[in-house]
Image (cartoon, grey):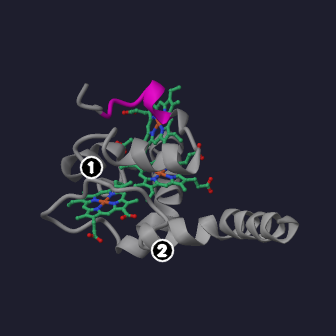
Amino acid sequence: MNKLIAILIVLMFGAVLLSPFVVNVISGGKATPDLVLPTTGKCVKDTEYMRANHMDLLKKARVKAVRDGVRTKDSSLKNCQTCHVRRDEFCDKCHHFVGVKPECFECHYFPTGK
Ligand code: HEC
Ligand code: HEC
Ligand code: HEC
């Protein structure tokens, strides 16, 4: 009887320890949530680069525009919207997922579709 309980406890711990791996397998090991991606056009840089570095691109463009008065059409927030039409289905979704909240949209217009 005691043996049975001990085995059950070991199995329960095992299940808890393994659960992140199980979730990972079920979700296909995705590091990002389901995003609504544009079906036409190409991003300003390749996907891998954008996933990791879009913030640098935007911040560089900001410095250029605000400090030097030089506009870079590609890297403006307005340009992103021509393809990533809704912020809530793309930018916000991923930002919630990773827990960042850029303060940009307090000033910059980027519709959420609501
Ligand atoms: C001409 C259309 C277009 C423009 C403009 C554009 N994108 Fe993209 N973007 C895409 C497409 C299409 C994809 C998906 C590519 C793929 O399927 O791998 C993408 C992918 C991305 C990704 C990666 C998403 C993922 O799956 O991880 C990020 C981040 C991103 N874009 C940010 C931006 C930002 C920021 C801007 C503005 C500076 C911008 N994009 C401008 C079309 C565009
Ligand atoms: C695939 C996931 C993903 C998508 C899609 C995405 N972001 Fe991000 N974004 C991130 C991550 C992760 C960070 C935080 C990086 C860090 O803290 O080093 C970030 C940070 C940022 C920052 C810097 C915030 C700060 O205060 O430093 C800006 C600006 C930004 N994102 C804009 C956008 C815009 C605009 C879009 C939509 C066009 C977008 N992002 C779409 C993942 C994403
Ligand atoms: C307090 C308000 C405010 C906040 C917050 C803010 N911006 Fe701006 N941003 C501005 C103003 C004002 C301009 C200049 C607009 C102009 O001259 O047309 C600007 C310009 C820009 C430009 C150049 C515009 C273009 O079309 O080329 C970029 C890119 C930019 N900001 C990105 C960002 C990003 C990324 C964030 C968040 C990390 C951010 N901004 C946060 C007010 C703000």
Q: Earlier in the sequence, mark 1 or mark 2?
A: 2
Q: Which residue in the protein does label 2 denote?
A: 25
Q: Name the residue at the right extreme.
A: 2
Mark 1 C-beta closer than 8 Å to ligand 1:
yes
Magenta segment range? 104-110
- Residue 20, by quadrant, is bottom right
Give, as a three-letter code, the residue at label 2: Val
Q: Is residue 93 visible?
A: yes
Mark 1 vs mark 2: give the one in front.
2
Q: Residue at x 19, y 48 (%)?
A: 82
Q: Residue at x 32, y 34 (%)?
A: 110
Report crowding for label 1: few under 14, some 14 to 19, many 20 or more residues within 10 A (C-alpha): some
Give, as a three-letter code, the residue at label 1: Asn
Q: Which residue in the protein does label 1 denote?
A: 79
Tell me the quadrant of ligand 3.
Answer: top left
Name the image quarter holding the C terminus: top left
Q: Is residue 64 visible?
A: no
